[in-house]
Amino acid sequence: MASRLFISIATLLLVCCNATFGEDLSPLSCKPNKFVFAGVTHSVREATISGVLNTPEWANFHGQPNFIKWHIDIVGTCDSPGHAPLRVSFNGLGLHVNRWQGLEGERRRWVNWQNPQTGGPYALVHRDELESVRSGDFNIFDRNGQLFRIVSSGCLDNAAEFSLDVSFTFTGVVVHGQHGEPEESLRRRLEAELPGHDLMLEKLTENVNQKPSTVSAHFAPSPENSK
């Protein structure tokens, strides 16, 4: 009886995470169009992972810890006129790693939309309106260079469900600083979060239209160092 119950639970978990027993879970085997919402399959326009490190002043003002916030977003193609493209954002998972490669193996499961660690939602669905994902399961199964295979499923308050099995591309980390903050200071702040990282400064931008003005440094992965 106990073994039969264990098999039933294991089978349920495999179905919930949209994986098949014995399936190759490497990113190269991923089918990038496996993105389903409310029973409708959507083609994937883009699926990305990026990090954002805000200024200490911003974090203090908003009462948030000042570490890298990981933005994990998938956007589908627009399936009908007059509708916005479907987007699911997993930006409130509270992931905290000291190497971007260390995102591999991260997993979250929730039965309440609000993450007690951040105070915000674990995930959001953007369509014609913004909705929190009431319950969900999120797994970063594997990595190959800058590609991460993510399998996730979730349910909204209106009972609509989504599931995905997609290869996400890591695009780098953006470090925000105050106006006039030197490049070396931005580098030091990133180093404090990701010690010994292999990211390279790709672009330094002055955001003069913001009030107050800020500076942003985009650090991108080097392909030869992404293993």
Image (tube, helix red, strand yellow):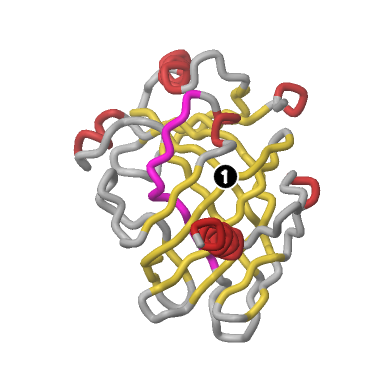
Front in this rendered view, residue 192 or 16: 16
- Give above or below for 43 relative to 140: below
Q: Is residue 154 magenta?
A: no
Residue 40, by quadrant, is bottom right
User: Looking at the image, which residue is at 35% across and 61% down?
Assistant: 111
Q: Percent x, y for residue 181?
A: 38, 21
Q: Amino acid at mark 1?
A: Ile
Residue on which disc 1 sits: 49
Q: Is residue 30 found left or right of 74 in the rendered image?
A: right
Front in this rendered view, residue 201 or 27: 27
User: Looking at the image, which residue is at 40% across and 39% down?
Assistant: 208
Q: Percent x, y for residue 155?
A: 44, 71
Q: How many marks?
A: 1
Position of the C terminus by quadrant: top right
Secondary structure type for disc 1: strand
Q: Is residue 94 magenta?
A: yes
Q: Percent x, y for residue 85?
A: 58, 72
Q: Is residue 227 found left or right of 133 in the rendered image?
A: right
The answer to whether residue 17 of the structure is visible from this angle is no
- Give above or below for 53 relative to 148: above
Q: Is residue 160 found left or right of 20 in the rendered image?
A: left
User: Looking at the image, which residue is at 66% across and 58% down?
Assistant: 19
Please state the extent of the stretch shown in magenta in the rendering.
Answer: 87-98
Q: Percent x, y for residue 57?
A: 25, 31
Residue 86, by quadrant, is bottom right
Q: Is residue 140 found left or right of 34 in the rendered image?
A: left
